[in-house]
Image (cartoon, helix red, strand yellow):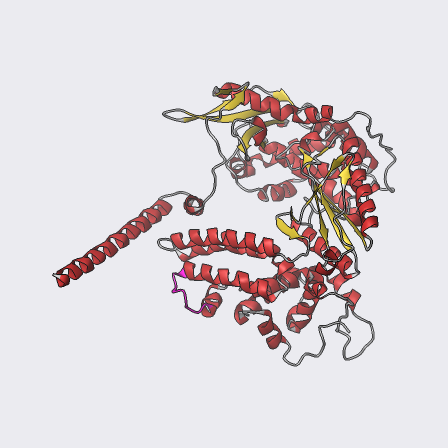
Amino acid sequence: MEVKQNTGKYNYNLALKDYRQSILQAKADWYKNRILDSDNKAKESWNIVNEWRVSNNNQHKNISLVVEGNLERNPKKTSEMFNTYFCNVGVEIHNSLSSLNRLSIQTAPVGDSCFSQFKQIDELSLSTILSGFKGKTSSGIDGISMKVLKACQSNLMKPLVHLVNVSIMGGTFPEGCKIAKVRPLFKKGSEGEVCNYRPISLLPVVSKLIEKVACDQLTHYLEANNLLCGRQYGFRKKKSTKLALIDFVNDCIEAMDAGETVLGCFTDLSKAFDCVDPNLLLQKLAKLGIRATVLGWIKSYLSNRMQITEVLHETKFKIKSVLSRPKNIPCGVPQGSILGPLLFLVYINDITEKIPESNLFVFADDTTIISRDRCINLLEIDANIKINEAAQFFSENKLKLNPEKTQYVCLQTHQRANSKFSRTPNISIGDVELESVSSVDFLGVRLDGGLSWGEQLDRIECKLARGIFVLKNLAKFQNLDLLLSVYYCLLQSHISYSIILWGATESNLKRIFTWQKKALRGLLRLPRSSHCKDHFIRLGLLTVPCLYILEVSVYIKSNSNTLLHNNQHNYNTRFKNNFAVYHSLSLFEKTPKYAGLKIFKALPSYITEIHSINRFKLALKNFLIEKCFYNLGEFYDFCCPNPRFSPSPT
């Protein structure tokens, strides 16, 4: 009897296994046929990936808004409500601010530079600009997508060149290009509140083409004459959130190494792009030397702008688009535009007249102010002065600073934090006390007061766990090329973004490297205990330690003029290439600057002597893929078994 029961259970398990394998095979065949039958195989593959991702769909249909306690479901009325709110939000914020602080700008230009006339553009230049746009299928109010324009560019190039030149040389922006189509995108909170939606603007493609030509020439003028704040990292070439984070961490740790406490105040502005006053902006442009036709063109670009709001309404048989009536936009820079971000940078550029540039870290509208001092009382005074100066600047420029969302954190060593003389400074804007926190979000990274990166690593692990879940499920029925694309997008991107900040600590690298090996085993459907080194090399994947070596070496190479030469002497000795950076704290050795110099000096000379950044990066990447280092110790043992220099300062 027992034998029969065991035999029946065995047969059941076999049948269950065959059934599950048949289901997986059927799914695999269905997905493969779905990709093969699609016109755009890459897009369809990512549609499948997104179906497996755990995320919210923010493209809402049939939006219902709360009006006096009742739900308004009529799509025409909801579109009008959205349009009224989006158009008037800047004016409402202006009205809520005190009229006592109003800015009067001296229009005398900064320096002798002047930009009064755009240069005409030819067909070749415009064709190059057009080829730089992505062939998106979305369209503005004109119904023409960038994909259609690019497909027809050979026939339309001459009239497009004529249209662009007439606009920029005549100082007038076409009226038909000033109408934006806006779609509301849900953020968070109650779905019935109009303030919980973000406007996504779609502009006519011809508008973007004209803007791009003007923006390139205006950017060249501002950058060539060094007119923009050096600590502005947003929307600029060779500037990024990553560089802002690196500079911030380097500055803070250098101050801590000098025995100082750093107080970072992270401000929050309400609807900053919507609150730009066009008249103030034009005055600031004039102060920077923007004159005559160029200034007149920008004035034309900003005036008489309109927008309509589109909401999607799903019926039993179809999804239809419902449009509001056009409404004038009295203030703000056009969102979704090419030129808007640059104009905003100009608008807040003169914050350096209130606060020294060395105390600022700015990324578009995210402004961080730092103060540093050995004495906590003096630090408190300095921080209060600077944040109130910033608040006055924002108020004068009709920007609203949110004290409730503005936070500050003290960055200091554990010894100073635990000292009997230590205390938390009290910072306030006017009569409103700001919130003191132990950690804060800064440009996508979680910063804690000791710069230990524990919370940031927790966040990365959560993202990697979600990515591995998607990867393991897709690995059952997807090809290797797609799986590698998913790996780069959902896993490596999260690892590499901030690794230059926390990667100098071996325990941090080991912690994330464990997750990376889990991902590789899931991608290739390997057993848990299988070795991964050969698979890393075969697939051309960089290990976590190799990713850190690559990121920090590229940073040093990109800034070699300032970082390498400042730490060497000019005497022709055996140890000429040594570097010496004097410091007191072991934490200083974890900075991207110090750790990067140490790693860069250990690299083979045939790599470091390459002048081109791109060729340097490619050669280093190939070297790291081939060697596949599992930790920094392996790297140093291989590169300098008998080191000719001591990476430690003398």
559 relative to 312 in the view: left or right: right
166 relative to 461 in the view: left or right: right
457 relative to 280 in the view: left or right: left
Quadrant showing the N terminus: bottom left
Question: Is residue 486 in view?
Answer: no
Toward the left, the furthest residue is: 1
Identify whether 37 is placed above or below 541: above
Q: Which residues are magenta?
A: 524-532
Let me know if residue 563 is in the magenta part: no
Instruction: Give the prevailing secondary structure in the magenta stretch.
Output: loop
Quadrant assignment, res 383: top right
Q: Between residues 568 and 77, which one lies in front from this camera angle?
A: 77
Question: Is residue 21 in view?
Answer: yes
Could you tell me which residue is drawn at 68 percent across and 61 percent down? 592
Rendering coords of residue 32 (x, y %): 34, 49
Could you tell me which residue is drawn at 65 percent across and 51 percent down? 447
Could you tell me which residue is drawn at 78 percent across and 55 percent down? 421
Let me know if residue 530 is in the magenta part: yes
Rendering coords of residue 544 (x, y %): 55, 63
